[in-house]
Amino acid sequence: MKQLIGIACCVLFHLPLFAQRQPDKIYMSNIHTVQLFLTGNQFGYPIIQHGAMGATELHFDDLDGTVKNYSYTYQLCNADWQPVDLSPFDYLDGFTQNRITQYRASSIASVKYIHYQALLPEKNCMPKLTGNYLLKVFLNGDTGKLAFTKRLLIVNKLVPVAAQIQQPFNTELFRTHQKVQFSIDKTKLNVLNPLQQIKVVVLQNYRWDNAVMNAQPAFMRQNVFEYNGEKDFLFPAGKEYRWIDLRSFRFLSDRIKSANREVTPTEIQVAPDGERNNQRYIWYEDLNGFYQVGGTDVNNPFLQGDYARVHFLFIPPNNQPYSGKNLYIMGQMTNYEYNDSTKLQFNANLGVYETSLLLKQGYYTYMFGTKDAGNSKAPINIAATEGNYWETENNYTILVYYRAFSDRADELVGAYTINSRASRTGL
């Protein structure tokens, strides 16, 4: 017999209001192309097993072109990315900060830079608890001179997760949304009060800007909690990401309109974009918002890849601006941040939105979305710019956090990723 949990005070909320207080963010304008990924896999989101040394690669470029003294540390955070009330000595073994000693100057690129890299974690600065860690890279041993931050998740998989992607029953959403339904097995945990001790977070394509958490299990049966509430973990499905191939600045790909290699950096004009919400859905393989540093004419793209100033144009309907809304470009290449650096400006003379980004040679995927002007907390909306289609291929990651009554931090005890095309069930 399944036992229904009926707690009226439990509410579902979207994590961005909390998670974006500790975002993946670049603080210095000379820092570009910051990547933290599973070793050998640029598409591998940094969720690693507890105790695994060198399981991730850190890469970044300093375009000042002079060697500097960069160091890093870790900040342990709870499930909502708020820093824990613990000393670093409570969650780090070895030193609390460590220098980045591996760097080289770019070789054949016209835009000169120093490329830094490291294999993390290292044994002399090793997280000893599971959970959410914010990697902080800073200058000259001064944590106040922050260069950038990146999220790193360390898990001890004590909780098995079973999941599937469903088409919502709600007739208003079943063509446009995807519903994540899952169960967790808490057999290995000492759970006395699941509403206080267990937290779950669901990410779409490893995005934290639209993450959902705080739903409570709809049913419990013995040691299994089932999360299948009709209104829980619903995501706009979106559409396959747009793409640009910048692996060569000499041989232009389909979506590149022009390139001027007579200037430094190279100036590249992307073919104009526009709304896709009324276009028929067509599946094609994409990178779900990720990008890959790479080049067709270089041997080591991390050290030899060049930079270009890439210009984007978006043509709105009837060449008129969106009323009361701002337009943003979004993807891992912008850390899904919504600020002046990712906002497109409307050119009234041409009737188009435009922006430019400094990008390294590689393959990039992205979308456009709107936000209510003047409301920084408003969610990003892709319904008009991209459209939402239930058939879209997305990855969903389920994170399970646990806190014993005697602990002062959330442990990450489960992490499971599921693909919508491989597991979906529809009406």
Image (cartoon, grey):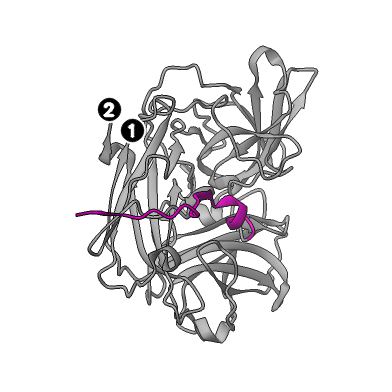
Q: Nearer the viewer, residue 109 or 101?
A: 101
Task: Tell me if residue 137 comes above or below residue 420 in the rendering.
Answer: below
Secondary element under disc 1, as helix, strand or loop, is: loop
Q: Which residue is rendered at x = 43% and y = 28% of the image?
A: 173
Residue picked out by circle 1:
167
Q: Are marks 1 and 2 in contact (CB under 8 Å)?
A: yes
What's the amino acid at mark 2? Leu
Q: Residues within 10 Å of mark 1 (few under 14, many from 20)?
A: many
Q: Does 18 appear in magenta?
A: yes
Q: Is residue 267 left or right of residue 277?
A: right
Task: Tell me if residue 384 comes above or below residue 44 in the rendering.
Answer: above
Secondary structure mostly taken by the magenta-highlighted segment of the chain: loop
Q: Which residue is rendered at x = 62% and y = 58% of the image?
A: 61
Q: Nearer the viewer, residue 296 or 256?
A: 256
Residue 264 at x, y = what percent? 71, 42
Report the magenta residues as a range.
Answer: 1-21
Question: Where, quadrant-wise, is the N terminus in this rendering?
Answer: bottom left
What numbered label is drawn on residue 427? 2
Residue 70 at x, y = what percent? 65, 72
Quarter of the rendering containing residue 34: bottom right
Residue 169 at x, y = what percent? 34, 31
Whole-angstrom CA distance, mark 1 to mark 2, is: 6 Å
Residue 251 at x, y = what percent? 52, 32
Residue 370 visible from this viewpoint = yes
Q: Does 296 appear in magenta?
A: no
In terms of sequence position, does the residue under pointer 1 or pointer 2 come before the other?
1
